Each structure stands twice: as C-alpha cells, then as structure tokens.
Image: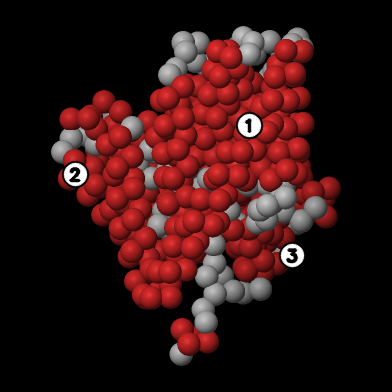
Amino acid sequence: MIGKLIVATILTGIITGFFITFYEILIIVTTLFIFMGDPLKTIPTLPIWYLYLVPTVAIFFVNYLSSKDNNIREYGVNEIAESIAENRMILTVKTLFLKVLASVLSLSSGFTVGTEGPSAGIGAMIAYHMHRLFHLPTLLIKMMISVGASAGVAAIFVSPLTGISFAIENIAYQFIKQYVTYLILASVIAFAITANYLDAITFSHNVGRTMNNEYIISNLFFIPFITAFIYFYLFLKKKLLHFIDRGIFKTCHKYRNHIFALIGGSVIGTILILEPQAAFSGKEIVVTLMNQENHISIFLIFTIILLRIIGTTVAIYSNAVGGLFLPLMSIGALIGYGFGELMTQYLFVVEPFYFAAIGSSIFMGVIMKLPLTAVVLSLETTFDYNIVIASGISVVLVEYFSNYFFTIQKNYVNRADKIKKTPMQLK
C-alpha cells in the first residue's frame, strides 16, 4: 500500500506541475487576447464601453458556470476532504475544467483575485482522482487532497516550502506527523516542473543574516499602520458590503448574483479606466514593489491601495473564481511601500521595498489566518532575516489587535458572508 501511495503522490506532483503551468499560460494568453496586447499598455487606448463590457460579461458567464456546478468555487481543503469522505461531494474531471475556465475568465478580465485558490483546488482534484485510480483506502482521502493542494500552491508560487506550509495549516494536525513526507514529495516535484516555465516571486535586495536595527525599530510603527488598513478591509467586506448584500437579499434574493455581477463588472471596469495596475491578480505589483529602487508617488500608492481593496471585496461578492492569497499580498506590499515612503519623508530613511516584502506577508497571513505560511513565504522569497523576523512578530501581533473588533473566519475568506434566510423567505 505504501508503494501505491508513493506512486500516486509522484504522479500527483507531475500532473499538477504541468497542469498549473498550462493554467498560468492560459491566463496570460487569454488576457493578451481580451485586451489586444499587454493590458497596462492597451487599456488607455480601448473604448470605455469595452472596458465595462469585458468584466461584466465575464462575471455573468462565471456565475452561469457556478450555477451548473457549485464545486468550482470550493477552495477549503478541509471542507473538500470532509465532504468527499462523507459522500456529499464528487469531484469530476468536468468540475476540474470548469474551475479552470471560470478562474481564467475571472483573472484575465481584470478581477482582483489570485491564482492560488484555483491552483490548490486543481491539485486537490488531481490527487482525488489519483486516490480513486489506485483504489486507496477512504481514510487517505483527506491526506491525498492535502497533498494535491500542497502541490498546486507550490507550483503556482514556484515555491515548495510555501506549498507545504499552506497544506499543513489547512489540514488536521494529527495528519502532519504521519503524512508530511508525501506533502514534501508532491510539492517538490510540482515545483521542479513549474520552475522551468514560470517565474517565482523574488526579492533582489536581501542581505541574508545581516541584521539592521533601524528596520526592527521602524517596524514597531508599521504594526499599528498596517492594522488600520486591515480594519478598513474587514470593515468594507464584513460591514458595508454585507449590509448591501442583506438589502439585496431581502428585496430580490432571486437576482442577488445578477445584481452583484453587475456591481462587480462596473467596479472592475471603473478600476481598469482609472488605474489598470489596480486590477488583475497583483503578482506583478508584489514583484515590482519588492524590487523597486525608484521612489513612487505616495498619492499613486494609496490610490491603488484603495482601488484594490474595493476591487477585491467586490470580486468576492460577485463570485469571481480565484483566491485571495495574491490580491492580499499585493495590498500588503502597497501598504508597506507607502509606509516606507512616509517614513523616509517624515521620520528617518528606510528602504520602502523592505516594508513591501513585510507588508505582503502580514496582510495575507492575518486575513487568511495562515501565520506559518506568511513567515515561510517571507523567508523563501527574500532569504533576509530582517524581513523574516519582522514578519513573524508582526503577523502575530496584528492578528491579535485585529481580533478586538473582527472575527476572521478562515473557512469563508474566499466567499461572501453568508446571509441567513428568514422563515418568510424560506416559504
């Protein structure tokens, strides 16, 4: 049985690696096709009506696909595994391709969602079919799905340790000791494949083990600064949009998805017109800010922050298919870079790209409740102790402060807040 498990794990890593490479390339090609070239260059030349039409039509089609198969929007590794084990869910090959199609449409049309959620889902589905192919025991479904999710995240980030830590933080801890070797095997194989085709998020300014106390001191100022933005993000998602959703649900709940699709298409279209850099997944923003040596206008930075926060929260309610890992990283990188610029102008000189790297890990780690993954990600992308130490301390303290006013639910981070039907609506 162990031999079967090893072969199934190796095949999961290989197939996931190639499938994720195809998925990422398909997003790039579709984006170039829709916007007739590099969107950052062509968007200013395209008609305004077209920029509104593209995301609106795309999200309506995504919602149509979701109505045909609800499983294409499911990302929770634990939830998927438990549903399959209890015979409440079956992941078909059709679901796999519909998930890829819906995600590609969401991402290539400008919605501010990431690639890691679908990538984890793709890996999980591939692992599930390996489990069935090799007739492995039902007891191993959860482990195999975690292996696939780990491989998917490792592949899309071209980062094996990030994939492993992501899976560990998303599965029951009793499985770690017994099955972590299989997570490592699948993640490393998937990473080895995508490393030949995709670009990783890298930090070119690392100083390794050299410690700079100025950055540790300035990080004390950064903790309340980024906490304030997390409050704003959570307020917008959990209070304002939830309030609007409740109003829509009460009056015309049958058309809730259509109304939010229109809102989502309109918001993303407006963002494309105002500032194209504030749309899409945000990977380029993270890489650029982490390695940016020329100073960027503070006004531009905070404009993009505002637009990305609005775009990301609206994308969730519009049912765009994609993760939040990258969009949250991009918001955090922007906040960190903006903080560094403010520090340089008004207190003492620091390099903004350092805080872009720290902010990207903290914002994602707190919102998604993945503190270990946040620290591992900061280590694997920067290899800089200044950033790793600051990220490790900050992600814990910021999460603690954020919990004073908000309850961050890990299970529903990729979904709109649930609206409960009243007895009258159930009739």
Which of disc 1 and disc 2 is earlier in sequence?
A: 2
Q: Is residue 389 above or below residue 401?
A: above
What residue sits right under mark 3 in the picture? Answer: 139
- Label 3 element class: helix
Rendering coords of residue 171 (x, y %): 72, 54
Amino acid on which the number 3 mark rests in the picture: Leu
Between marks 1 and 3 in the image, the one whose residue lies nearer the viewer = 1
Task: Classify mark 2: residues with Cα within 10 Å, few (<14), some (14-19) or many (20+).
Answer: few
Q: Nearer the viewer, residue 141 or 267?
A: 267
Point out residue 212 in the picture as x, y percentages from the top left corner.
74, 11
Which of 256 and 92 lies nearest the eye of the viewer?
256
Up/down of 8 relative to 213, above or below: below
The label nearer to you, 2 versus 1, is: 1
Q: Does 258 sit left or right of 389 as displayed?
A: left
Using the image, tell me which numbered label, if any, was put on residue 225.
Answer: 1
Q: Is residue 125 among the parts visible in the rendering? A: no
Asked whether the residues under the numbered discs 1 and 3 touch, taking CB atoms below 8 Å apart as contact, a structural biologist would say no
Where is mark 2, residue-wise? 50
The residue positioned 47% from the left and 68% from the top of the image is 246
The one of 47 and 208 positioned closer to us in this rendering: 47
